[in-house]
Amino acid sequence: AQRVTQPEKLLSVFKGAPVELKCNYSYSGSPELFWYVQYSRQRLQLLLRHISRESIKGFTADLNKGETSFHLKKPFAQEEDSAMYYCALGGTSYGKLTFGQGTILTVHP
Amino acid sequence: GAVVSQHPSRVICKSGTSVKIECRSLDFQATTMFWYRQFPKQSLMLMATSNEGSKATYEQGVEKDKFLINHASLTLSTLTVTSAHPEDSSFYICSAGTGGGPSTDTQYFGPGTRLTVL
C-alpha cells in the first residue's frame, strides 16, 4: 500500500528564516513525488515535481529513496509563502495521487 | 495554463435530494478526471477516477451507487450525490489530467464545490 506522511500539521517560522516541510512516503514501486500548494481561498496548484528537478518560488525538494523522503525546503521564507502544502505520491495506475495530510505553513513578519 | 472549472461553487440542499456537480477542463482535453473530498483543514481523499467513455474506478469505501460519476466527454465529468444526507456535507474537488502515459501527469485542480445538506 502507498502512503504519504507529513508529520507536521502546523509549521511557523519568521520571515527570512529557512523552512523545511517534511514528507515521507511508503511505496514498493517507482515513486513520483509532487508538492502541491493551496493558498488561502485559492485552488490547489502544483508547486514542483521531483522529475523536473526545478526550483519554484525558491523552493526545492530532493527525492531521497534511501530515506523515502521528499522534503520541501526554502532558505529564506517569505510571508507570501504562508499556505497549506501537500506532498503527493504518484506512479500508480491511471495517474492517481496519494496525498499527505498537509502542513499549514505560517510565515510571520 | 490548464484551467479546470467546477459548477456550482456552493450548493445547499435538503436531505434526500440529489445534487449534481460538474467539472470541466476549459482549454485541454482531460483523459482522466479525479474526484476528491476534503474535510476542513484536512487532506484530500480520493473518491474515484474517471476515464472518458468508461466506468469510474472507485476507491475502497466509497459507495458507487451514492456517488455517481459520469465522464461523457474529454472535457466534462459529473459527480452526482444521490439521496444526500448531512454527513455528505463536504468540499468536493475535481482534478483533470491528460494522463495515459507511463508517468503521473500533472493534475489541474478545480476550485471546489461546497455542499451543505440540511
Image (tube, grey):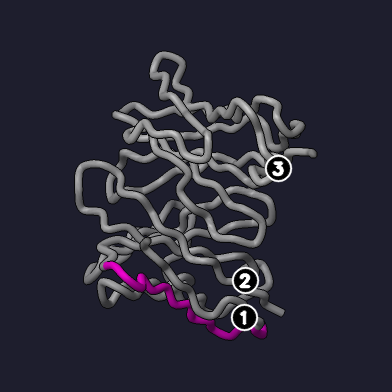
Picture disc at residue B11: 1
Picture disc at residue B114: 2
Q: Position of residue A31 (x, y in %)?
A: 34, 31
Quadrant including the C terminus of chain B: bottom right
Q: Chain of mark 3?
A: A
The three-letter code of the residue at mark 1 reads Val
* Residue segment shown in magenta: B13-28
User: Do the residues at pointers 1 and 3 share their chain?
Assistant: no
Measured along the vertical axis of the image, is residue B103 above or below residue A38? Answer: above
The quarter holding residue B32 reads bottom left
Magenta-span inclusion, residue B27: yes
The three-letter code of the residue at mark 2 reads Arg
Magenta-span inclusion, residue B114: no
SS label for mark 2 = strand
Residue B112 visible within the image = yes
Q: Nearer the viewer, residue B56 or A69?
A: A69
The quarter holding residue A74 reads top right
